[in-house]
Amino acid sequence: EKGGYEHFMLKEMYEQPKAVSDTLNPKHDPHIVDGKIVLNELGMTDEEILKIKKIYIVACGSAYHTGVTGKYVFEGMARIPVEVDLASEFRYRNPILDEGTLVIIISQSGETADSLAALREAKARGIKTLGIVNVVGSSIAREADNVMYTWAGPEIAVATTKAYSTQLIALYLLAMRFSQIRKTVSEEEMEVMIQDLKRLPDQIELLLANKEKIQKFANRYLAAKDVFFIGRGVDFAISLEGSLKLKEISYIHSEAYAAGELKHGTISLIEEGTLVAAVLTQEDLYKKMISNIVEVRTRGAFVMAVTNEGNIEVEKASDYVVYIPQTNSYFTNSLAIIPLQLFSYYVSLGKGCDVDKPRNLAKSVTVE
Ligand code: M6R
């Protein structure tokens, strides 16, 4: 059932090009038609979309991390204010849910107890809910007013990879659809974005082919005590996910930090040889990020940078570089996550951990 792969996680990472492509444009309900984003399954009218004043994205774990990316994308593209919340916080804090609020619940399993409770709380208050769910017919899929499915297929490894990647796609599509209706993006820009979206599966494939290089690099960090992930904008969102992947399966402590926050605390933890993974995919933030890289290197950090092809400045400023192919700046998380997933996988493998079933963790958290 592992299809020749040593672990489900590796198999599922390799299924990402297909999972992403199936979610982008499901055969039974194409989402890209005549240069436009069409989301028939969503069942939301243009009028409903125009009336949205605020979005809450509510989820747990990695699904929450895709929500953080979603905030940057929705606000940037569709100009709708977005609040991202952990389901276990949202449900207990009496959130302000006015008319015109849309609550988006993201969940691979569709059964996570806190996410389901958050959905029920929003519904009980008469607020419109939208589920982004992978398991067809799951509780969240059944109870949400509207559903957008991700088409990752069954995910077995506790550490999510392909479901995470498809959740990102669902959020891009939603943000694009909303932008189209609210006219916050020109037709030309939309066309370019659609072309970029369509290229993602092949680009992911290309990055997966780099696995030997990443494995070699990962093997140098099997004894690491702490690792830090830093980024700005959507690269901060991906730092959260990169950090969770590593600690979840390799038991190495790691932290994600918005790069600008480093000097407000974390930088005191950097020692000679500490690994810092710096993600830099946002051109307008390169300079700021490079100065953060300099800050940590001055204190002895070893910097692995993940950045866009052709970013020579970063190559000069860091110790090890992984390049990702060019895409729209909203979509870079879909590419930058691949080397970070591979890195965690190979650290876990090298340390002899139980990659697919890390200690103390369950695939689906159905307790509160
Ligand atoms: O099934 P869900 O998407 O609701 O699960 C949410 C989290 O439990 C999940 O993403 C968890 O953080 C993963 N194990 C991370 O790899």
Image (cartoon, helix red, strand yellow):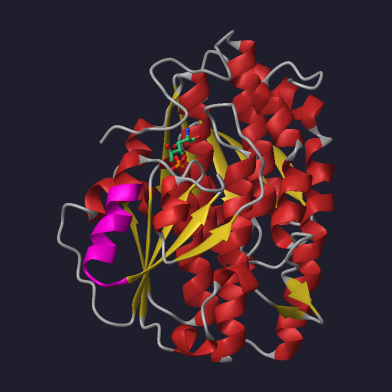
Q: Position of residue 194 (x, y in %)?
A: 76, 73
**How many labels were placed on the picture?**
0
Residue 34 lies, with reference to residue 328, above or below; the image says below
Q: Position of residue 10 (x, y in %)?
A: 70, 26
Q: Is residue 354 above or below residue 289?
A: above
Query: Looking at the image, which residue is at 60% across and 66% down?
Result: 172
Q: Is residue 212 above or below residue 139?
A: above
Say whether residue 270 is magenta.
no
**In the picture provided, is 253 more to the left or to the right than 330?**
left
Residue 366 picture quarter: top left
Point 42% across, 47% down: residue: 139
Tell whether position 119 is magenta: yes
Q: Is residue 39 left or right of residue 296?
A: right
Classify residue 304 by image quadrant: top right
Name the residue rendered at 41%, 41% in the picture: 111
In percent of width and height, residue 356 lies at 58, 20
Q: Compare residues 206 and 148 and report the one nearer the observer.
A: 148
Question: What quarter of the picture does the C terminus occupy?
Answer: top left
Residue 264 showing in the rendered view: no
In the image shown, does 107 or 283 lie closer to the viewer?
107
- The magenta region covers 116-127
Residue 224: image location, x then y, percent: 50, 18
355 or 107, which is in the foreground? 107
Dominant secondary structure, magenta: helix
Q: Against 343, is 134 above or below?
A: below
